[in-house]
Image: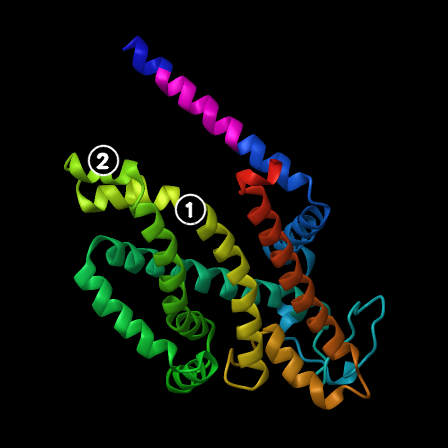
Amino acid sequence: MRAEKTIKRLAGGRRNSLVSDVVRRYMRNPAAVIGGVILIIILLACFTANWIVPEEMVTAYDTQARLQPPSAEHPFGTDNLGRDLFARVLYGARISVGIGVGATALSLVLGAAIASICAMSKKADFFIMRVVDVITCVPTILLALVLLTVLGGSVFNMVLTLTLVSVPGFVLRIRAVVLGVVEQDYVKAARVSGTRSIKLVVKHILPNALDPIIVDATMTISSMMLSAAGLSFIGVGVAPPNPEWGAMLNYAQQYFRTAPYMAIFPGLAITLTALSINLVGDGLRDALDPQADK
């Protein structure tokens, strides 16, 4: 009993040391720290939007205040229907970031599950890889356009569409990592000792493949957001009056000469969010690399 407690204490100390090493390496990257600060501010804005601006202002029409430039009353100005752009950009962060995080999380879970099946069964691996090969032959944007045309424009359908078109890529990338882990001696020893496949995947394979998967998922969030914005921009994404950033850019293009702020602020929001997520992803990639200290 005493020996078990000692082993657990040593394991806990080792985990704490690893976490502190990751944090230390991350904090040594100024760009990653700046990206993290920007991302935290954006996430705080998402969660506290109700306390900053009333939700009614997102869809409140005021024909007397159409296309007003930025002012004290309307910090980002108003759009062609007199709606407050600051409120729409702020609440649009919830939709755009939510789509990116939701689609990435679903794709990650499905991709990890399918990749684990591929790693544990050669027959399943052969069949699944042929299906993935067929799907990847179709351009991602074309497949997304077809799915959204069939399903219709909504936040849920956007998340579902981006998940379906992204799962094959996750399967390929996670499978490559998992297959490398499967060949390790400790996995072979666990398999020989009679460990069941599910326990083997959950306890030994996925935890040891987690670092590159985390980095890949982080970088994918910005790609999902940009894809959602692009689809909404061409008119097949999130339907109005939802304040999605890409849809806001679509409305703004015809007023770019007379009211450029209608495009500037949503565009800046997309750029800053995607950039901050990419900087955080780069920082995590370096921080999770033990060779970074050498």
* Image mark for residue 210: 1
Q: Is residue 73 above or below residue 189?
A: below
Q: Is residue 66 above or below residue 94?
A: below
Which residue is rendered at x = 19% and y = 40% of the image?
191
Q: Which image quadrant for residue 123?
A: bottom left
- Quick one: label 1 or label 2, which is nearer the N terminus? 2
Residue designated by label 2:
189
Q: Main secondary structure of the magenta part?
A: helix
In this view, the residue in front, 189 or 163, is: 189
In this view, the residue in front, 274 or 256, is: 274
Q: Residues within 10 Å of mark 2 (few under 14, many from 20)?
A: few
In this view, the residue in front, 152 or 63, is: 152
Which residue is rendered at x = 52% and y = 55% of the image?
218
Q: Which span of residues is magenta-colored?
A: 7-18
The disc labelled 2 sits on which kind of residue?
Ala
Which residue is rendered at x = 16% and y = 34% of the image?
193
Is residue 220 inside the magenta stretch?
A: no
